[in-house]
Image (spheres, rainbow, N blue to C red):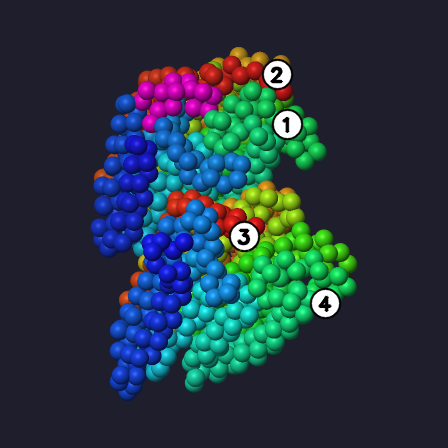
Amino acid sequence: MIIEALIAVTFLAALVTFVLPDRYAGKAAFALSLVPVLGSLVMWQQYDASGNALLGGNIAFETDVVWLQLGQYDLHWMVGVDGISLPLVVLTTILTTLAIVSSWTPIAERQSQFYGLMLLMEANLLGVFTALDFFVWFVFWEAVLVPMYFLIGVWGGPRRKYAAIKFFVYTNIASLVMFIGFISLVFGLGDSISSLRLPEIAQALQAGQLSGFAGLSASALASVAFVAMFLGFAVKVPVVPFHTWLPDAHVEAPTPASVMLAGVLLKMGTYALLRFNFTMLPETARSFALPIALVAVASVIYGALLALAQQDLKRIVAYSSVSSMGYVILGLIAYTTYGVGGATFQMVAHGLISGLMFMAVGVIYNTTHTRMVTDMSGMADKMPVTAGIFVAGAFGYMGLPLMAGFAAEFFIFKGAFESTVMAAMPLFTGVAMFGIVIVAGYLLFAMQRTLFGPFQFDGDYEITEAPFHDVAPLAVLLLLTIVLGVSPDIFFTMIQDAVNPILELGGAF
Amino acid sequence: MTPLQTLPDWTAMAPAIVLGLTGLLLLVIDTIDPDTSNNGLLAGVATLGSLGAGGIAGWFLIAGTGMEQTGGAISLYGDAIVVDGMSLFFTLIFTSVAAMVSVASYDYLADRRYQGEFYSLVLFAATGMTLMAMSNSLATVFVSLELASLPSYALVAFLKKNRGSVEAGLKYFLIGALSSAVFAFGISLVFAVTGSLILPDVAANLANADELVGVLGLGVLMIAGGFAFKTASVPFHFWAPEAYEGAPAPVSAFLSSASKAAGFAVAFRVFTVAFPLDTVTALGGGSVDWSLLFAVLAVVTMTVGNFAAATQENVKRMLAYSSVGHAGYALIGLAAITVDGGAANGDVLGASMAHLLVYGFMNTGAFLFIAMAEKWGIGRTFEDYNGLATKVPIAATAMTIFMFSLAGLPPFGGFVSKYALFYSAIESGFWWLAAVGAVNSALSLFYYSRVVKAMWIEEPSKPLEIGSQPVGLYVAVVFAAVGTVLLLPGFQPVIETAQTVAAALF
């Protein structure tokens, strides 16, 4: 029941915040958002699951009741967590709270609506990561889009309407493609399943129950469904060449929305890839190893090169997310315990670090009202604390040892080198590792120009150190990054426990 | 068997009786002192009467009145009226819409004359609709149809000084009269062939049509035309945008939700009971395969409604065309019926009924929001709604819920009811119908989201002046919004009831 309580409390918090006067909304939203944080920590502390939720593992905090009986397939309200989803639940609650605090300075208009939407989005995100029935999952998955659309469209920058519509249209079409892919899989399973519960579907697929549908053979159907779902999720991640909505959305979105977008919403894509494509259709995934690895490496290198070419600090961080998500895809397709586990760990690590970077850029923007690298230099003189955390975060991004990013990327590379899905995997890994050099290049270059050197600023604003409540979330994120880097086992043990059953899957057809 | 098992059979008609008596009571109250009218009292009585009738219908449904477990449908007055699960289910739709409209009209009618007449007309129309759902004879169908229609004409033209309202009323009346004539002629042809007006007797005598099959087919076509008018389906939909736009917004809400559902109630019963598909298609040359007919109508109706809605600049008119589009979705319930469908027939018809119930909430709510906007006097186009969310966040949130739910977006009732409808259509083998519906519903997001975008994202072009905060309208709109949301988790009892009562028709 704790999951239902968590989601319900967050929904209620959103409602309460929505009707509060603007003056109290920010503080109240922060206070209310601490409840889900506590709840998720309690879940982490009492976590007792083992194995993978979809593959017959022991699911923690599970609820499974029939919701709708409609024709052949019952719809269940089924929620629960395993080692893959719990870290993302914790990430969601913590990041939302910090993002709310980081909104206190930049968000001045229609505050109660803003904070209400942030909490509404959190509730839906929790649903996405805990739902174990396809229908329930899909409801939450789509429901996340609505608050994000408003957050970008109402509180965004000058081109916010264009960015919001582009985000909405891209991700909605992607959902449709994914939906068609998945439903064709369900029809292919025919009578062998009686509900749309993900574990039931995954296990039926493993048992070789997939038969042909609409003139396709079982293996062809699996391939078609895999490609459709991959394309649908790839837009969300995003990978090259489906990434063009991301920079627009990020640049126009207000800082807290960017934090949520990069920190959690992108992970919906990789989480779904792992849950659907790589868990349900492992054989098909292996047979597509080459194109997937190509996409992964292209995202890593091309994303990093794009970041290198930007003058806008936020665009730099945005494109670097594309690059980091490429690592996740590489880890997933490696199909080794460190590869898939590292990819899952990277979801959390990148959530923290990219959140940190976007917030740091936001704090600088709050003071300078510009994000252009060319408009400023020597900011470290005036904003030493912010600059210090920014530098530390950037090093985290580059993979400094003892920070979460290092652990994640190390796991992924180790896993990818050990991978046996295809002979050329070490080559791909080697090329992808080169991406780190580019990351270091553009981050150091950007910091050198903006933070260091003689102080110079062309605007009319007085540059002073940011207020405490702007810096505090940065410090918390940095602390969490270091804690996770020093002892990745906080999450990595449970991740590996949930990932290993995926690797033991044989080919069923 | 009636609910308490001891009452006489006619008490099964209690919902219709309560509605009719409330309508009369309103007239009495108004005549006591004709010069002044107590708006609050009238609205309260009308709302209570609707809620009371709805409550009785709900109680009957739960108790299983007229359903299989208590001995089957209750036939009254020589089989002219039948009370079964389906009629009670539809009564629930009519009464909940009538209740919302009555509450909302409290504000809309403030400072207007003829308040007592307005409420009683609404109640009489609701009585007619309830009787339509209970009709078991083509004669009662026609009479109750007129009982529902005549008050509707007057309601559309209620704003006597408003040219748009009067013009809309006249158009609605002329087209309504024409379609009534066509409908009556269709009935006479069917009677000529089968020698009966009682629906089951018509079905029993179909096989004797012999060389008159062509006449029968023509009669069936004309009856279908009458329903197309009442449900605002293509090709008799063109009155709807005019009438809904010109009418006072609460009346538009009432007509586009309840009146449409009443049309479907009677169409569902007449076609499944009087013209069973297997018998009709077995007649050979000259007879009408109405399943195919409705399939074509469904596709054309939803497509025409959607594309017309997409080109509108006036929000109320957009909603009017969206209401045409939704008639197309509901038609799937008849279109997807097959000769050897078995249980799937009841499933798809039930899904269509469940969609009409959800539609009753979200569409009524949307039109009542328009009523609010008319009350504020902010204008009619999308641009006029710009920035509304900054002024009236709660009402704007409710409207957002209605728009997204009408578009079939999760997590609202409209999503799950459309899912159930399309899923049942696929189960009956009509995957192409479901596909057309799904594509249309995806496209509809375009024009629904324009309202949302205007309210929340656009800057107002001129300063917004929101005068009063109409309490009754707020209550009705919020109630509809809560209903729309709660129908997502609470959809199971609705669809279960709908499919059970629909299965009883076959």
Residue A58 lies in the magenta-colored region: yes
Q: How far is the residue under mark 2 from the one under mark 1? A: 27 Å
Q: Secondary structure at mark 3?
A: loop
The residue where tag 3 is placed is: B505
Mark 4 vs mark 2, foreground winner is 4
Numbered mark located on residue B215 in the image: 4
The residue where tag 2 is placed is: A422
The residue where tag 1 is placed is: A211
- Give amino acid for label 4: Val
Q: How far is the residue under mark 3 from the one under mark 2? A: 60 Å
- Asked if labels 2 and 1 share a chain, the reply is yes
Mark 1 vs mark 4, foreground winner is 4
Q: Position of residue B429 (x, y in %)?
A: 64, 43
Q: Quadrant of the N terminus of chain B?
A: bottom left
- Asked if labels 1 and 3 share a chain, the reply is no
Q: Position of residue B348 (x, y in %)?
A: 55, 48
At horizontal 28% and vertical 76% (from top left) the residue drawn is: B39
In this rendering, the answer to whether B326 lies above or below B187 is above
